[in-house]
Every structure is written in C-alpha cells, then in structure tokens.
Image (spheres, helix red, strand yellow):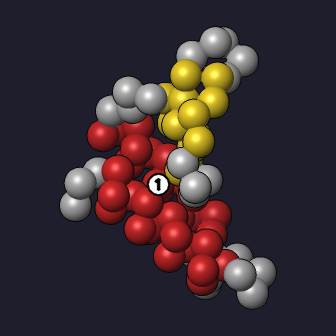
Amino acid sequence: MDRDEVDESGRQTVRRVQYELPLHATIEDIKRRYKRLSQLLHPDKCPDPRAMDAFLEVTTAYKTLSDE
C-alpha cells in the first residue's frame, strides 16, 4: 500500500491510504491532512456506503503516522 512518488515540484512523497504527504511531513502536516480527510469521509457526512471503511482506514493511517 505504501508507494514512493515524486510530486510535480520534484519532491519525494510517500502515499499511504489517501494521505499524500511529503516524505518528512511534520506531525502538524499529518494532523491537518487527517482532519480534512476525516471530515470528508465521516460516515455521518458522506452518503457513500464505503465511507465507514474509508474512514477507518484513514484513522488507522493517522494513528500509524503519528505514532499513537
């Protein structure tokens, strides 16, 4: 699921789940991205039947990336 990529500015990034963060993202970068994705994917706000699975995947990724 992890994949190294190079963004349009030539910086290397790591893609985990739907996180598209710089390789050396700060905890603040991770928190901001998690907050945005969790708001978009929260099952109470997203009518897609896959929302719960996606939300849980993002939450797991956040816990992993933030070492919680």
Given residues 42 and 8, the one toward you in this image is 8
Name the residue at 55% across, 22% down.
12
Pointer 1 local density, CA inside 10 Å: few below 14, some 14–19, many at least 20: many
Q: Amino acid at mark 1?
A: Tyr
> Could you tell me residue 48's position as x and y percent?
77, 81
Q: Which residue corresponds to mark 1?
A: 34
Which residue reaches farthest top? 10
Given residues 33 and 45, the one toward you in this image is 33
- Quadrant, the C terminus: bottom left
Asked if 30 appears above or below 18 in the picture, the reply is above
Name the residue at 41% across, 68% down.
60
Left or right: 25 with respect to 52? Answer: left
Name the residue at 72% across, 18% down.
8
> Could you tell me residue 1's position as x and y percent?
58, 55
Total number of numbered labels? Answer: 1
Q: Secondary structure at mark 1?
A: helix
Asked if 20 appears above or below 44 in the picture, the reply is above
Given residues 2 and 37, the one toward you in this image is 2
Which residue reaches farthest right? 48
> Could you tell me residue 20's position as x and y percent?
58, 40
Q: Quadrant of residue 13?
A: top right
Which residue reaches farthest left? 68
Asked if 10 appears above or below 6 in the picture, the reply is above
Left or right: 32 with respect to 42? Answer: left
> Could you tell me residue 5's position as x and y percent?
63, 30
Left or right: 24 with respect to 58? Answer: left
Q: Quadrant of residue 39?
A: bottom right
